[in-house]
Image (cartoon, helix red, strand yellow):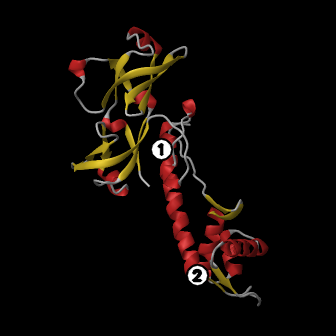
Amino acid sequence: MTGEKIDALLALRSEGRLLVGRDRIKLLEAVAEHGSITKAAKAAGFSYKTAWDAVDAINNLLPSPAFVTKAGGRSGGGAHVTEEGRRLIETFHRLEARMSRISSLIAQEGFAGHDDFALWSLGIKISTRNMFQTEVISVRRWPVDVEVTLKVTERDLIHATVTNEAADELALAPGRKALALVKSSFVRLALFDAEGMSGRNRFSGVVRRRVDAERNSELVIDIGSGKTMTAVIARQTAEDLELQPGAQAIASFNATDVILAVD
């Protein structure tokens, strides 16, 4: 599945009942364009009854109506979208855009190993590996790439390289909160060496756990400050380096392998 596009579908609910999904937003936008439930239903692919049911459901669940309608007549009556309805459309598209960014990350990461992403920008808390909530410290622009420095803890920084287009889209600037993700297979492990600890994206720590498969090993490294980093490396490499629980090691990755997401 890695690399494929994932379609993120957003549905807003209130007290367990569907308030609005993509189809109802499409209907709402059609009402705004056509000023008629009949014409809007046709444009959105709804039956006339389904369109009215949707209108009633949305209006019943919102603090104030999203639609103002007037039934009757051969045309089905007039209708227009209120300010509340326009705010609903705007909010829905903003949230769906956030979900689309996260689904793009999932498409890049894949589902191998059952990795999930913490959808903290949508208020959903789930676990994942190599996900760090950070704060942008600096943004250094070059003609093609942008170097971004992010603070993980008071002593730990992550350096990421993104395109200028991505930096603009994410509005990266000092003080901006960002989610930094690193695919576990991109993390390299080496033996602890005090003389070789300099350099970017190098974290010294202790092997907390190792799980072996036929070809690969998954290792969880405690890098301090309550943070861990997971690496998937060749099992032979893990054995050659004698990376058993309690062993000291250095985890590192390239700045180009960091994925950034913002709220």
Q: How would you rate the neighbour count of disc 2 (Cα within 10 Å): few for under 14, some for 14-19, many for 20 or more?
A: some
Few, some or many C-alpha atoms within 10 Å of disc 1 (few <14, some 14-19, many ≥20)? many
Find disc 2 in the rendering and name its residue: 82
Q: At 48% from the left edge and 34% from the top edge, which residue is drawn?
A: 129
- Picture coordinates of residue 59, whole percent (x, y): 68, 76
Q: Amino acid at mark 2?
A: Thr
Q: Nearer the viewer, mark 2 or mark 1?
A: 2
Q: Are marks 2 and 1 in contact (CB under 8 Å)?
A: no
Residue 52 image point, x, y percent: 74, 76
In the rendering, at what x and y percent does residue 163 appear? 31, 48
Tell me the residue that label 1 is attached to. Answer: 105
- Which residue is depicted at the point 53% across and 36% down? 110
Q: Which residue ends up furthest to the right in the rendered image?
A: 49
| Secondary-structure class at tag 1 | helix
Query: In the rendered view, does 222 fall on the left or right side of 83?
Result: left
* Residue at image point 56% right, 37% down: 1
Left or right, 73 with respect to 210, comes to right
Per the image, label 2 sits on a secondary structure element best described as: loop
Farthest residue, direction bottom = 73
Mark 2–mark 1 distance (CA, rounded to whole Å): 35 Å
In the drawing, does residue 140 fall left or right of residue 124?
left
The amino acid marked with disc number 1 is Leu
Q: Quadrant of residue 195?
A: top left
Q: Indicate whether 131 appears above or below 174.
A: above
Above or below 186: residue 168:
below
> Looking at the picture, how far across and down is residue 54, in whole percent?
72, 71
What residue is shown at x 50% (from left), y 50% (from top)? Answer: 120
Question: Which sits in the foreground, 19 or 221?
Answer: 221
Q: Who is closer to the viewer here, 252 or 203?
A: 203
